[in-house]
Amino acid sequence: MQQSMSRFFTACKNLSLTISTKKTEVFHQSAPQKMYVEPTITTEGEILKAVEKFTYLSSTLTRCVNIDNEVDTCIAEYLHLAEERASQVSRPPCTYARHTPPKKLLCGELAEDKRTQGGQKKCFKDTMKVSMRSSGIDLDSWETLAQDRPDWQSYIGKGATSYEQSKNAEGQKKYELCKSIANPADHLCLTCARAF
């Protein structure tokens, strides 16, 4: 176990990752019918703390290989949940009508300033379809095109440059349109006839 931990800490050090030795704990279960020996795992001169119990994903493991402790913790959790349910049942009834959902449910995102501007949220597949259409890639045959990697990459590069050029041209056209619509100068200087 010491050798595995030493290798793990060395790998973390090589990747510039830091591990808190104060938070790191050691848990060891001996084989059935064998005497428990507390492990002494050291890293960088510090001995890691050995624990009796370890909880992971709502299951509690103990150093003695016995299912009784696991069953006791499960029963305690279920009793706690049952008490919570009983307290929820004894709460006063809802003040809003049953056919209308609560405002917190409908306006939760608005209350927390999470509303995004624009249209509906699109999933990744829909976003990819829009990008492929704008790049000039055929949606029905793109999978066969992608089989040949070099051709596919050049095809994507050409599509991206054509898309950028069309976007730039469209932006330039909008700019020119706004510029041409601009109101002519209304104020003329009486002495020099210059427009303002």
Image: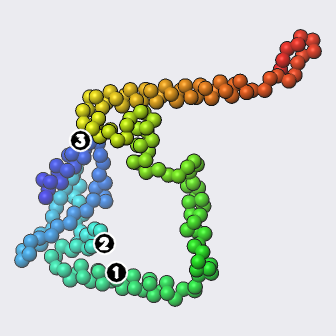
**Residue that label 1 marks:** 77
Whole-percent x, y for residue 188 in the image: 88, 18
The residue at which mark 3 appears reads as 14
Q: Quadrant of residue 64?
A: bottom left
Kindly report which numbered mark, 3 or 2, lies closer to the viewer in this rendering. Answer: 2
Q: Secondary structure at mark 2?
A: loop
Image point (41%, 43%), residue name: 129
Left or right: 11 with respect to 158?
A: left
Q: How many numbered markers are drawn?
A: 3
Q: In the rendered image of this protein, does residue 159 appear above or below residue 104?
A: above
Pick the residue in front: 7 or 186. 186
| Distance between the alpha carbons at the discs numbered 1 and 2 | 9 Å
- Would you say the residues marked 1 and 2 are in contact, meaning their CB atoms lie under 8 Å apart? yes
Task: Categorize mark 3 by other alpha carbons within 10 Å: few (<14), some (14-19), many (20+).
Answer: few
Q: Which residue is disc 2 drawn over?
A: 58
How crowded is the residue under tag 1: few (<14 C-alpha within 10 Å), some, or many (20+)? few
Query: What residue lies at 16% left-to-right and 61% top-to-bottom?
Result: 40
Could you tell me residue 3's position as x and y percent?
A: 12, 53
Relative to 85, is 184 above or below?
Answer: above
- Badge 1 or badge 2: first in the primary sequence: 2
The residue shown at (27%, 83%) is 72
Mark positioned earlier in the residue sequence (3 or 2): 3
> Which of labels 3 and 1 is toward the front?
1
Image quarter in which the C terminus is found: top right
